[in-house]
Every structure is written in C-alpha cells, then in structure tokens.
Amino acid sequence: MRRCCCFKRSVPGSQPVGSSNLFQSAVISSKYDGSFPDNKKSPIIYAKPKAHVSINDSAAVESETANTQISVEVLKDTWSAFYRFSRPHTVIGTVVAIASVSLLAVQSGSDLSPVFFIELLKALIPAVFMNIYIVGLNQLFDVEIDKINKPYLPIASGEYSIEAAGAIVVASAVVSLTMAWMIGSPPLLGALLMGFFLGTAYSVDLPFLRWKRSALAAATSILCVRTFAVQLAFYQHMQSFVYKRPAVVTKPLIFGLAFTFLFSTVIALFKDIPDVEGDQYFGIQSFSVRLGPKRVFWLCVYLLQALYCAAMILGVASPFMWSKFLMISAHALLSVILWGRAHSTDLKSKAAITSFYMFVWKLFYVEYLVLPFVR
C-alpha cells in the first residue's frame, strides 16, 4: 500500500505535530477554551490590542481632576473664612457655659434622660447663631480697626465683602430669634433678646450706642451677656421650662454667677491688651489704652488668683468630701499653672500676649467643667 505524507497548513505561529502513522497539524484557534492539546504544549494566545486613549480623553480626565482639586480648595477656603469670622473661642465658651449651667438643674441620674440632651441641643443651636451675630456685627463696624489689630479676619483681609458678611449677620440673628420663639421658652427667648440688644449696642455706630468706645460700658455689656443671659437664663430654661420645676437659686448657681461675673471682667479687660495700637489710633478708650497694657495684664492675673483662692475656700466649706477634694485640688492646680504662664509671657510681644489671652479662655472653659461639681 502506498504511503503518503500530507501536511495541512497551520495557523501562522503554530508548529506541525507528527506521529509514526499519521501526520497531523495542530491548528490553534483564536478562541482558546482553556484546555491544552495532547502534546502538552501551551497554546499560543494572541492578546487583544489595548484600547487607544485619545488626546481629548486624556485632557478630559486631567480637567476633571483639576476641577475636583479646585472645588476642594474652594471648600477649604470657605470654611477657613467662616471659622475665623465666627470667632471660635467665643463659640466654644458659649457652648461649654450653657452645657455646664444646664447640668446644675440636674437633681438625679434620671434627669439625664434623652429629653435633657435634646432640649440642651435645641437651646445650643440658637445660642450659637446669636453668638455669630454678635461677633460678626462687631467685625462689620470694626473693619478699619481690624486691619491694624486683626488683619487675619475675613472682612479686614478682603475675603468677605461687607454685603456677604452683612447677610451672614442678619441671617444668624433671624435664625436665632425665630428658633427661640418656636421653642416657646420665655427664659431662652429673653436670654437671646438680651444678647441681641447688648451685642448691637456694643458695636453699632449710632448715637448713644457704640458702647465699646467706653471702657465701663463695654465691660458692662460683656458681663451682662456672659453672666445673666448665659448663666441665669439658661439655668432657668432647664429648671422651669424643661423640668417644670419652680425657679430656685441654689448655692452652685450663686457660685457660678459670681465666678462668671468676675471671670468675664477679666476677659473684658484682657481682650483689649493686644489691640492697644488700633484702639489708640481710632480713639477707643479701653482700660489698656488708659492704664497701659502691663498694668492691666497683672491686674487680670491677680483677679484670677483671688478667684481661685475664693473657690478653694468654698471647697473647704463643702459638706461633700468629693466636692471638697475637687474644688481645692483643681483650683490650686489652675492657680499654679496661671502664675507660671504669666511670668513666662513676654509683655513686649503682641503674639505672646494674644497667646496668653487665648490661654485665659481655656481657663474659662475648665472652670465650667468644674462648676457642676460645686456642692
């Protein structure tokens, strides 16, 4: 029998495979099912060409990335400007003070129910908006002074226009008073109305107003807001409106009123020390302008030391050992820290004095943390 050899043309790139009896060709399909042929050799798989990316597509991706980065930067700048405009150290002081005096109305563990925290939040929101109204209004009427004393504030730096800042101020007042009216608490509404009128009288440049020009009137307006509007009114809001109890004046409340009154006096005096240059130029007769920054600085330090001594004496008189220990140890520690910080402050440096002023605010916050434990 005639033997013949036959070859089939293989796919380019494939190799012919033969045997002793038959010669076969292995044809590798472009579609591979995952199995290997009998000869155990791996098939040749032709990769699909990569998709072509056009120049326009690349430019679109880069443009979208750039737009995203710009949006993030805009959000950061917007938040930074509003953060500085709201004067956050005063907002924190308001929040801590209201929370602290609200706890004075708590008589037992059962009073710390979800209702307490909900009502506290409902009181805090309009209070923060009123705080923004007061500090924002002051910036609107202090633009030229702030260009010297606080050029980083958004109106003075040009980040906010007068119109934009005015819109924020008006909206804050409207939201605050509307929320208080809707809540229906007379003490809460009274506290916010007091803050509105005193904050307006302090800053607005109209006849019989602009109280900040007078050292005594300026200090009085700040004391009334911090002592009576915050301390007394918000305590009565929790006591009579939330818990439906008779309005009473307790020992912790009296201590809180007295301490806040004197501490707010220190803040009212101290806040003008870093601003002497601008206040002198524009005729603002603050105590720092009239007495000199150094005298006012040490007057504030001695007042705070006297307050801490009084608090320790009150602690000794407490019938509760835990309250006695906390009042004495906490105020002794704060007194030592204050004295050391005061003696290390360079009174010729505006930055150092400003830093010490913010330190005084921190002492103010700490005192509100101690206040609920006064018994």
Image (tube, rainbow, N blue to C red):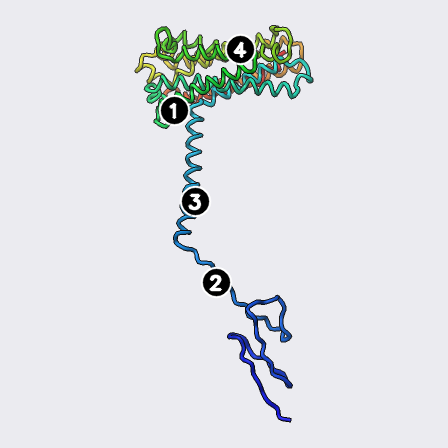
**Crowd around label 1: few <14 · some 14–19 · many ≥20 (10 Å):** few
SS category of the residue bearing label 3:
helix
Residue 32 higher or lower than 266, as above or below: below
Residue with the mark numbered 2 = 49
Foreground disc of the pair 3, 4: 3
User: Which is more N-terminal, label 4 or label 3?
Assistant: 3
Residue at 61 percent across and 91 percent down: it is: 3
Q: Which mark is residue 259?
A: 4
The residue tagged 1 is 164
Horizontal and vertical percent for residue 176? 49, 17
Does label 2 or label 3 sit earlier along the sequence? 2
Residue 34 place in picture, x, y as percent: 62, 66
Foreground tag (4 vs 1): 1
Q: Residues within 10 Å of mark 3 (few under 14, many from 20)?
A: few
In which quadrant of the rendered view does residue 155 lie?
Answer: top left
Disc 3 vs disc 4: Cβ atoms closer than 8 Å? Answer: no
The amino acid sitting under disc 1 is Ala
